[in-house]
Image (tube, grey):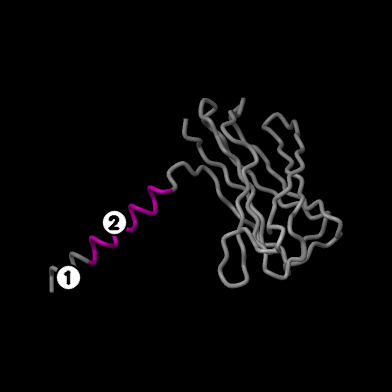
Amino acid sequence: MYMKIWNTLGFIAFVAILFTSCDSGRVFDDNKTIVNDAWYFKNTVPFEVQVTDTNALYNIYVNVRINSDYKYSNIFMWLNTTNPEKKTDQRRIEIRLADEGGKWLGNGLGDIYDYQFPVFQKIKFPNSGFYRFELEQNMRDDTLMNVKAVGVRLEKAVE
């Protein structure tokens, strides 16, 4: 009986170590729910990230979660980045969500699909401090339906 308990505890510890070690480069990863799955074009989604290591290289990703009723095969959005000195940079990005045949490209579970799109790879932040990232939808529809959540991920890059 004691052996079974120790085996179970050992397995739980192994799984915990496995999951925490797989994401050791993550600095920030947050997704915000879009109310009623309806993203109005004037509703920016803000994220604030503190950067302390200006010598490290970073990757920045945009996360998107949609449901299968989303009517386009892509999504355009603005990524606005404001540095600690309040200088803002704006970048328009396109994320392909489906192939030419309409098959969703993201990781799916049921009718929900997740995407993680690389925006910047191996960049350095020139200054430490708080960086603000804002996402705005930039599609033809004023209100973009069936978008469940959007997010930003910042991770240290492997050199």
Q: Earlier in the sequence, mark 1 or mark 2?
A: 1
Q: Residue at x 35, y 53 (%)?
A: 18
Residue 63 image position (x, y, % from top left)? 63, 52
Residue 9 falls within the magenta-colored stretch: yes
Judged from the image, the secondary structure of the residue bearing numbered disc 2 is: helix
Quarter of the N terminus within the rendering: bottom left
- Under mark 1, the amino acid is Lys
Q: Please give the count of numbered marks on the rendered protein.
A: 2
* Crowdedness near tag 2: few (<14), some (14–19) or many (≥20) residues, C-alpha within 10 Å: few
Residue 148 image position (x, y, % from top left)? 68, 64
- Please tell me which residue lies in front, 99 or 6: 99
- Under mark 2, the amino acid is Phe
Residue 4 numbered mark, or none: 1
Up-down: is 118 above or below 10? above
Disc 2 target residue = 14
**Relative side of 10 to 81, left or right:** left
What residue span does the magenta drawing correspond to?
8-22
Q: Residue at x 23, y 60 (%)?
A: 10
* Crowdedness near tag 1: few (<14), some (14–19) or many (≥20) residues, C-alpha within 10 Å: few
